[in-house]
Image (cartoon, rainbow, N blue to C red):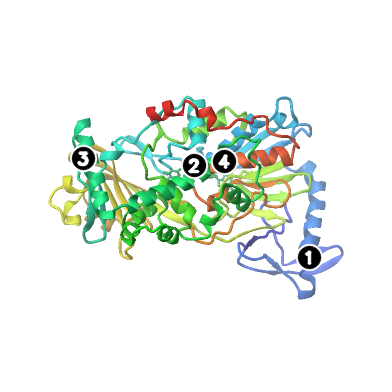
Amino acid sequence: MRSTTIIYLSKSRLHVKPRVTLLGLNWKLNLNDDFSCSPILRLAPNMSSILPIIIYLFALFTHSHSQSQSQSQSQSISSPTICIIGSGIAGSSLAHFLRSYSPPNSPSSAARILLFERNDIVGGRMATVTISGETFEAGASILHPLNYHASNFTRLLNLKPRTPPTSESSLSLGIWNGSKFVFKTVTSHSKNPFVQKIVSFANSLYMLLRYGFSLFKMNSFVEVTVNKFLKYYQSFETRPTFETVDEMLKWAGLYNLTTCTLHDELVNVALTPLLVQELVTVITRINYGQSVYISGLAGAVSLAGSGGGLWSIEGGNRQMASGLINRSDVELHLHEEIYSIFNLGEYYELSSTKGRSYMCEVTAIATPLDELNIQFTPPISIPERHLQHTHATFVRGLLNPGYFGLQTVSEIPELVGTIEEPDLPFSSISVLKQHNETDMTYKIFSRKAMPDSLLESIFSVRKETIRINWAAYPHYKAPEVFAPFILDGKQLYYANAFENAASTMETSAVAAENVARLILSRHFGEGSSRSSNLMSSFSDDKLLHSDL
Ligand SMILES: Cc1cc2nc3c(=O)[nH]c(=O)nc-3n(C[C@H](O)[C@H](O)[C@H](O)COP(=O)(O)OP(=O)(O)OC[C@H]3O[C@@H](n4cnc5c(N)ncnc54)[C@H](O)[C@@H]3O)c2cc1C
């Protein structure tokens, strides 16, 4: 377990002096360099157990006396303040759910919602990149046809869904092992729908010949998991709120999938080793930058993200965040990073890098805490984990067929996936747009940064290159251990605790919805006003999806 500890002695950033006079005693403090993993103060052994409590009480005391002089925003006691940290899909949808589930004229409906975003743009990992004047998804790019919250937001915000530019079925795939393509589907550049259908049929046949009926077993494994996930859209009458991720997963029948690796789950359902080593590996490397030894649940979600009917939002998925924030009566604090959260009993005091502080009755963290340095007083304890970094490299230019042992560019599949080979320098290369036969935009995913020297050998033409190092998603393992949704047993919530089960835009929204319901019931003592079954509100679903 990771323990983040701070002893807060001042309103500005952390101030710890080697000697402090407290309660008439002179205390000698030994500072520990590693602030993130262990308590920052160590004392003479007999005092160590009580000092944090005393200092916390002392800090509380000084806080209450200094409040009138502080830069804290004066806030009306009658309208409670809910502070949300992070403006990605979790934070923005949390604000949306709080507003839409608050019963009319209730205390919660009068609450102020403050939303903090350290960047100067909302959306978090839903972001776009502009290369040579054209804009593409830089982070989260695809949605599943059964992502009901995302579908709902799209309709609510009048956004336009779109299918990927190249017809999914005729997108050619090659599996590269570092020296040759071990599997390749047919590449067709014809725009004729009839030709595309034939090519798609031929490619399905190729797949069947190589992987056999294991493909159906894989599909049914994904289907069973997706069906369990659909329970999270049931009406409130049949769906409780969950205080822990474990509880939430167990209720839907998904917990066991987090206790085994995807590899073991697929062996259990008798998938052939070839399918696991090749196609499944390609998919987990593309979607989570990791191998088949991720947890079974993260793996199933990753496989679901490779099926048919995938969609995105015209103009960028991040419009979901901006749209939800716009219509949720939120006070948005852009470019303002929260660096400490201090529990003052009735309030949490949030301090920001702009030198301001805010008093919030409720605080919700809507970002992974794993690589953040937010200081909590008193300390919170969450399982220690790492984020998987994915390097997304965008290149406008042309691939070098020689790198792949081919004669012409047209022989290179539009999606080059890779298997687990230690020296393979990238996870995938895909064509984002074919401007003409000698000019394309590509996206490369890799576990390490792609140096220029490597790009020089992979590309014959490189007009522009953009690199993004994403702290992308959790590094999954099995069995998984989860942080709770309620970090301190009081009013400090953590929506991204659920991300350690699976990381997607939709799972973030599902977790945020649960946290909104927790806040309404635990802080305001209110039930949520809306009680419909989200799936049934999509009875015209087919209509929507046929448009996608
Ligand atoms: C390369 C890549 C590809 C992906 N592909 C897909 C995909 O195709 N489909 C899919 O569904 N998902 C995909 N994902 C996963 C998806 O992006 C995430 O699961 C989802 O967007 C997480 O949203 P979030 O709101 O929980 O977190 P984030 O989007 O990370 O939002 C957190 C926000 O909090 C802000 N913040 C952090 N700390 C502070 C602080 N101290 N003070 C103020 N603000 C702070 C951050 O700046 C950020 O804006 C992908 C992710 C990556 C990186």
Disc 4, SS? helix
Q: Nearer the viewer, residue 454 or 367?
A: 367
Ligand 1 neighbours mark 2 (CB distance < 8 Å): yes
Residue 436 drawn above or below residue 66: above
* Structural distance between the alpha carbons of marks 4 and 3: 38 Å
Local crowd size for mark 4, using a 10 Å CA cut-off: few (<14), some (14–19), many (≥20)? many
Q: Earlier in the sequence, mark 1 or mark 3?
A: 1
Q: Quadrant of the C terminus?
A: top left
Number of numbered discs: 4
| Pointer 4 or 1: first along the chain | 1
**Residue 7 in picture, x, y percent from top left:** 71, 59
Identified at 49% across, 33% down, the residue is 320
Task: Identify the amino acid type marked 3.
Answer: Val
- Write down the quadrant of residue 91 in the picture: top right
CA–CA distance between discs 2 and 3?
32 Å
- Residue wearing tag 1: 51
* Three-letter code, disc 1: Leu
Q: Residue 143: image x %, image y %?
A: 43, 39
Q: Earlier in the sequence, mark 1 or mark 2?
A: 1
Q: What numbered label is drawn on residue 199?
A: 3
For label 3, the crowd category at 10 Å Cα-Cα, with few meaning under 14, some 14 to 19 and many 20 or more, is many
Q: Mark 2: few, some, or many residues within 10 Å (few <14, many ≥20)? A: many
Q: Is mark 1 within 8 Å of ligand 1?
A: no
At mark 2, the secondary structure is: helix
Say whether residue 361 is visible: no
Q: Amino acid at mark 4?
A: Tyr
Residue, disc 2:
505
